[in-house]
Image (cartoon, grey):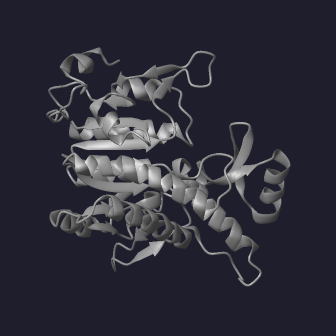
């Protein structure tokens, strides 16, 4: 099967951790072992990753650098995170998959310059701030901040992806049997001039899960796999008794009140992919990618068959793979 696997930036740099290279290398090592299991099981794998904590750190460093007359724009910083995380993943996977080509590809993602997201920032980047620090950054640097749990964080525009610029290159690399790392951080956000075809970077961060769903659809993938730092999607998240969902339909996911800056886009991406392709989407823990697509952990998402919808694709096989009865039971 062809699998597009998306890992979260927060899974590589977790809350409260120092943003040191060694910390991220440790998490990348664990992520690579989980992803390598998919390849070893015979699947064709494209990997994408988040960059929220990483791009926030780079943005903060750039704004504080006295040698610069202006900080680097977010699209350029996004390219830097693609290179940094891409090389860490490629090194680990190359060691775990001897004889298999592993390639990290700098990838651009087109967005609509008129997307209303440019006027409504929602994408969290960077570390946590106290209320006082957030107010200070809003005054001194013109940031927009929002509450993320008990603390505040910077938020930036996150327009919806409309096209993956390097899609032909990704398809060509897959044709050689390579494991491809692409569209990191949702891809470098660009707009395209309709007259000249030139692309220009924009001040935004594309949500990596929505970009992964678009990439999976355009690659005709069988599975969209979203790996994060929680085991399931939970109904009643934040309540006294959250309920882990083992299976769900797109309608069920969209009915949940999920945080817009974190689990919300993951659920949206999974629902969109399942609806538009008939394929399987799954959201689960970073350390068990294979178990998540087999249904032994995580939340699997399938659209119920309809006359107007796409023909459902075959489910992955395995001792605990979700079957038709699980699809009918999903609500």
Pick the residue in front: 235 or 35.
35
Residue 286 position, x and y percent, is 44, 43
Residue 302 position, x and y percent, is 27, 29
Say which residue appears at 23% left-offset and 66% top-offset: 99
Q: Is residue 322 above or below residue 84?
A: above
Pick the residue in front: 74 or 292.
292
- Give the side of residue 186 with respect to residue 240, left or right: left
Residue 200 position, x and y percent, is 45, 75
Q: Quadrant of residue 204?
A: bottom right
Q: Is residue 58 above or below residue 5?
A: below
Is residue 109 visible from the viewing direction of this image? no
Q: Is residue 54 above or below residue 301?
A: below
- Give the side of residue 103 with respect to residue 242, left or right: left
Q: Quadrant of residue 242?
A: top right
Say which residue appears at 43% left-offset and 50% top-offset: 31
Residue 298 position, x and y percent, is 40, 30
């Amino acid at each position: 099967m062809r699998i597009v696997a998306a890992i979260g930036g927060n899974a590589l740099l977790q809350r409260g951790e120092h943003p040191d290279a060694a910390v991220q290398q440790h998490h990348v090592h664990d992520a690579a072992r989980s992803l390598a299991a998919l390849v070893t099981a015979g699947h064709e794998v494209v990997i994408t990753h988040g960059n929220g904590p990483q791009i926030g750190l780079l943005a903060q460093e750039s704004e504080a650098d006295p040698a610069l007359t202006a900080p680097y724009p977010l699209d350029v910083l996004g390219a830097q995170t693609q290179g940094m995380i891409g090389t860490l993943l490629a090194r680990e996977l190359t060691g775990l998959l001897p004889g298999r080509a592993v390639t990290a590809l700098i990838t651009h993602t087109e967005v609509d310059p008129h997307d209303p997201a440019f006027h409504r920032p929602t994408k969290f980047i960077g570390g946590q701030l106290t209320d006082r620090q957030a107010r200070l950054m809003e005054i001194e640097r013109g940031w927009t901040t929002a509450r993320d749990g008990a603390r505040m964080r910077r938020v930036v525009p996150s327009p919806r992806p409309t096209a993956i610029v390097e899609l032909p290159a990704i398809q060509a690399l897959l044709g050689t049997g390579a494991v491809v790392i692409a569209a990191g951080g949702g891809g470098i956000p660009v707009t395209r001039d309709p007259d000249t075809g030139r692309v220009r970077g924009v001040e935004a961060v594309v949500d990596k899960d929505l970009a992964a769903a678009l990439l999976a659809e355009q690659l005709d993938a069988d599975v969209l796999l979203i790996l994060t730092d929680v085991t399931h999607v939970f109904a009643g998240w934040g309540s006294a008794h959250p309920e882990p969902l083992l299976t769900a339909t797109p309608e069920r996911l969209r009915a949940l009140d999920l945080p817009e800056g974190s689990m919300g886009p993951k659920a949206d991406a999974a629902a969109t992919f399942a609806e538009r392709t008939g394929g399987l989407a799954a959201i689960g823990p970073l350390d068990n990618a294979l178990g998540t697509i087999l249904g032994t952990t995580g939340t699997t998402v399938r659209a119920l068959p309809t006359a107007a919808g796409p023909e459902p694709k075959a489910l992955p096989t395995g001792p605990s793979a979700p079957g038709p009865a699980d699809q009918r039971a999903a609500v």
